[in-house]
Amino acid sequence: MEERAYWLAWSQINGIGPILLQRLHEHFNSLATAWTAKSIELSQVEGFGKQTIEKTLQER
């Protein structure tokens, strides 16, 4: 899957908006890499709290 497809996939997760998408991209340098990140890695991204992480793990 190409990077553009990961932008779309991430944007479908409830609670992930453009600001969190940008932070994910900056933190992991790739949304594809972010897609496979563990919860502890996601928690290092500003704005990713417990609820957002749980929702992400459920929906992706």
Image (cartoon, grey):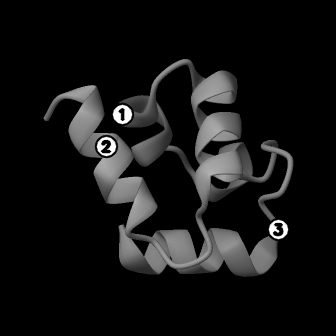
- Residue found 73% across the figure and 81% down from its top: 51
Task: Give coordinates of residue 3: x percent, y percent.
Answer: 28, 29
Q: Nearer the viewer, mark 2 or mark 1?
A: 2
Mark 3 residue element: loop
- Residue found 31% across the figure and 52% down from its top: 8
Callouts 1 and 3 close, C-beta under 8 Å: no
- Residue found 68% across the figure and 73% down from its top: 52
Task: Give coordinates of residue 18: x percent, y percent.
Answer: 61, 50
- The residue that label 1 is drawn on is 32
15 and 39: which is toward the camera:
15
Crowding near the residue tagged with mark 3, few <14, some 14–19, many ≥20 C-alpha atoms within 10 Å: few
Q: Amino acid at mark 3?
A: Gly
- The residue that label 3 is drawn on is 49
Mark 3 to mark 2: distance in Å?
21 Å
41 and 5: which is toward the camera:
5
Q: Is residue 36 visible?
A: no
Q: In screen coordinates, is 1 left or right of 42? A: left
Q: Which mark is residue 4?
A: none
Crowding near the residue tagged with mark 1, few <14, some 14–19, many ≥20 C-alpha atoms within 10 Å: some
Q: Which mark is residue 6?
A: 2
Quadrant showing the N terminus = top left
- Residue found 22% across the figure and 42% down from its top: 5
Disc with the residue nearer the chain's start (1 vs 3) = 1
Q: Residue furthest left?
A: 1
